[in-house]
Amino acid sequence: SQQGEEDPQALSIQEGENATMNCSYKTSINNLQWYRQNSGRGLVHLILIRSNEREKHSGRLRVTLDTSKKSSSLLITSSRAADTASYFCASSAGYSTLTFGKGTMLLVSP
Amino acid sequence: DTEVTQTPKHLVMGMTNKKSLKCEQHMGHRAMYWYKQKAKKPPELMFVYSYEKLSINESVPSRFSPECPNSSLLNLHLHALQPEDSALYLCASSQTSGGGYTFGSGTRLTVV
């Protein structure tokens, strides 16, 4: 089954605004991770939230996890043009490998 | 060293060629991965190596042949590829206990 479906597929905002991306998954997870990818290059690990955590912060990033709804959200506050990228959630069950969602393309305009 | 290094960055090969993609990390990660990514799609897992042994092969065609010579190196040997194999090939590594992956910047492969 497909894990990690993000929405929206694309998001366009102005600098200084907040960006929120959502992710849903279908099976029980050990942790959920968010990655950023610039222009088809390598993925950069942003943040990991474990199944027993509900919220986590890292700089301008805030991630929430609702295991009852099998969903997660990534909030980027005070966005910058440099945040323009594709963002993927990825779920991990036990010690299994990551399964990536379809991703959200974020465009931040100056 | 906190990087995964992939070479080459770009590769164009004919359908009868044999080429290899290389991946190297010195973070002591004992799990290494190959992913394939088509344009505007998420990465798809191809192979997983754990402690230098192949642990997962996601039904990848035999024209892709992985190799893990030691704990720092991962190769992907390519032979008789098809144009539809053109994609970004990503290598990643992680601790075997789980956690975040460190990705290389990828090899952009074009098969002509």
Image (cartoon, coloured by chain):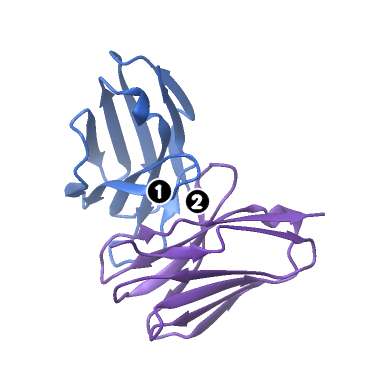
Chain colours: A purple, B blue
Badge 2 sits on which subunit?
A: A
**Number of the front mark, 1 or 2:** 1
Q: Which of these two is toward me, B8 or A98?
A: A98
Identify whether B34 is placed above or below A11.
above
Q: Which of these two is toward me, A3 or A90?
A: A3
Sort mark 1 into few (<14), some (14-19) or many (20+) by Cα contacts within 10 Å.
Answer: many
Whether residue A108 sits left or right of residue B94 in the image: it is: right
- Same chain letter for marks 1 and 2: no
**Quarter-of-image position of residue A52:** bottom left
Q: Amino acid at mark 2?
A: Leu
Q: Is residue B31 visible?
A: yes
Q: For numbered disc 2, what is the local secondary structure?
A: strand
Q: Position of residue B40 (x, y in %)?
A: 50, 45
Residue lying farthest right? A110
Q: Position of residue A98 (x, y in %)?
A: 34, 60
Residue drawn 53% across the image and 74% down it: A73
| Alpha carbons under labels 1 and 2: distance apart | 9 Å
Q: For numbered disc 1, what is the local secondary structure?
A: loop
Residue drawn 46% across the image and 38% down it: B106
Q: Which of these two is toward me, B69 or B32?
A: B32
Q: Which mark is residue B43?
A: 1
Whether residue A50 sits left or right of residue B69 in the image: it is: right
Residue drawn 48% across the image and 52% down it: B2
Q: Amino acid at mark 1?
A: Pro
Residue drawn 44% across the image and 33% down it: B107
Q: Position of residue B56 (x, y in %)?
A: 19, 50
Identify whether B87 is placed above or below A51.
above
Identify whether B12 is placed above or below B21.
above
Which residue matches tag 2? A43
